[in-house]
Image (cartoon, rainbow, N blue to C red):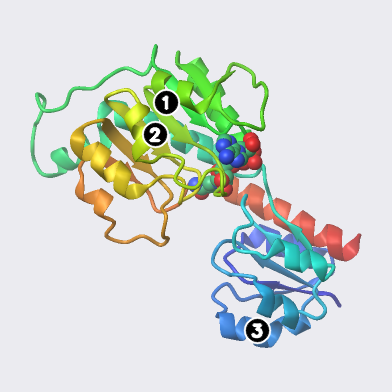
Amino acid sequence: MMKVLICDATAQSALDMIAEAGIEVVNKPAITPEELLEEIAEYDAMVVRSRTKVRKPVIDAATKLKAIVRGGVGLDNIDVKYAGSKGIQVLNTPTASTAAVAELAIGYIFALARNIPQMTISMEEGEWAKKSFSGTEIAGKTLGLIGAGRIACSVGQKANALGMAVVAYDPYVESAEGIKIVALEELLTLADYISLHVPYNEGTHNILNADTFAEMKDGVYVINCGRGGTIDEDALFDSLKSGKVAGAALDVYTEEPSMGHKLYTLEQVIGSPHIGAGTVEAKARVGTEVAKNVINVLKG
Ligand code: NAD
């Protein structure tokens, strides 16, 4: 019987689907790197999310492995090229979390515009600070998207429906419905909100930095539900301190996990611990796609 090792938390419905297809499922969502190295030779496929790293030593030890299936979008935690050179297929679930991440980014636009988290904290502290909080409206404002892929386009379409003008910078995309593709320089000068939806790569490393912050409108808001490493966090800190950037909402960070980050000493920074894809619905979709990928590779 073919065997699949589940290395990170995966929906029970996915494990059931795989088992029903006649594949033995071994669920070890807390497996350590040492245990993984020892045990991986027994398996035909492995399922990971972000926690488990699949680099050369694991791949070398995985003598029977046919597939590495990642529940999620990026493949940053897997040495895809090396796996490919050993004939191992690497598959992910690229569309399953699009809606969840897009909705979080839209949620952050509202939260920033109306100071929703800060007002909640004030209420919890027993205040009635009606005069301290003045909001702005998002209708009529311009949203600048860095990246014009699946998630960015979904954010752009929702923003359009909310009355925002939408521009995007993406050197690999020529056109997108309801979104004007522009040069980065133009986006920086036009946008009231800048939302990042790019992978981390050479071209996106610290794409927001001291120089690009300087080009932005005064009082711009910045949102990152994409990948860490795309914002120079020291430059963002300085731009928030000076008031150039009015507020920032962050789901991803240069170093993760990120506890006690200095950006959170600023009350105009709001955020979350990389949970962009963390909805019930997205987790279920990720599970179904993971199961289908495993079954397709092992059962054809
Ligand atoms: P996608 O591949 O559809 O879109 C990414 C876009 O980035 C592409 O259109 C690509 O051309 C563009 N791009 C690449 N390099 C660029 C550069 N140098 N400058 C500008 N654009 C560039 O991916 P997606 O599904 O839309 O996901 C977008 C990002 O969101 C990914 O980084 C993904 O890892 C991240 N993500 C985060 C979460 C989360 O939990 N916060 C969940 C899912 C995805």
Quick one: which residue is furthest to the bottom in this view? Answer: 38
User: Which of the two residues, 176 or 229, is positioned nearer the viewer here?
Assistant: 229
Q: Residues within 10 Å of mark 1 (few under 14, many from 20)?
A: many
Image location (x, y in percent) of residue 123? 15, 38
Image location (x, y in percent) of residue 277? 53, 47
In the picture, measured across the screen, residue 281 lies left or right of residue 229, that is right
Q: Going from the N terminus, do you reach mark 1 or mark 3 first? A: 3
Q: Amino acid at mark 3?
A: Leu
* Residue found at x 41% / y 52%: 253
Image mark for residue 212: 2
Q: Residues within 10 Å of mark 2 (few under 14, many from 20)?
A: some
Mark 2 and mark 1: span between their CA atoms?
7 Å
* Residue found at x 56% / y 48%: 202
* Residue found at x 39% / y 16%: 141
Quarter assignment of residue 238: top left
Quarter assignment of residue 162: top left
Q: Secondary structure at mark 1?
A: helix
Cβ–Cβ under 8 Å for marks 2 and 1: yes
In the picture, measured across the screen, residue 238 lies left or right of residue 172, that is left
For disc 3, the marked residue is 37
Q: Amino acid at mark 2?
A: Thr
Instruction: Name above or below for residue 233 compared with residue 76.
Output: above
Image location (x, y in percent) of residue 262? 25, 54
Image mark for residue 188: 1
Image location (x, y in percent) of residue 117? 26, 38
Ligand 1 image position (quadrant): top right
In the picture, measured across the screen, residue 292 lies left or right of residue 49, that is right
Q: Amino acid at mark 1?
A: Leu
Image mark for residue 291: none
Cβ–Cβ under 8 Å for marks 3 and 2: no
Q: Secondary structure at mark 3?
A: helix
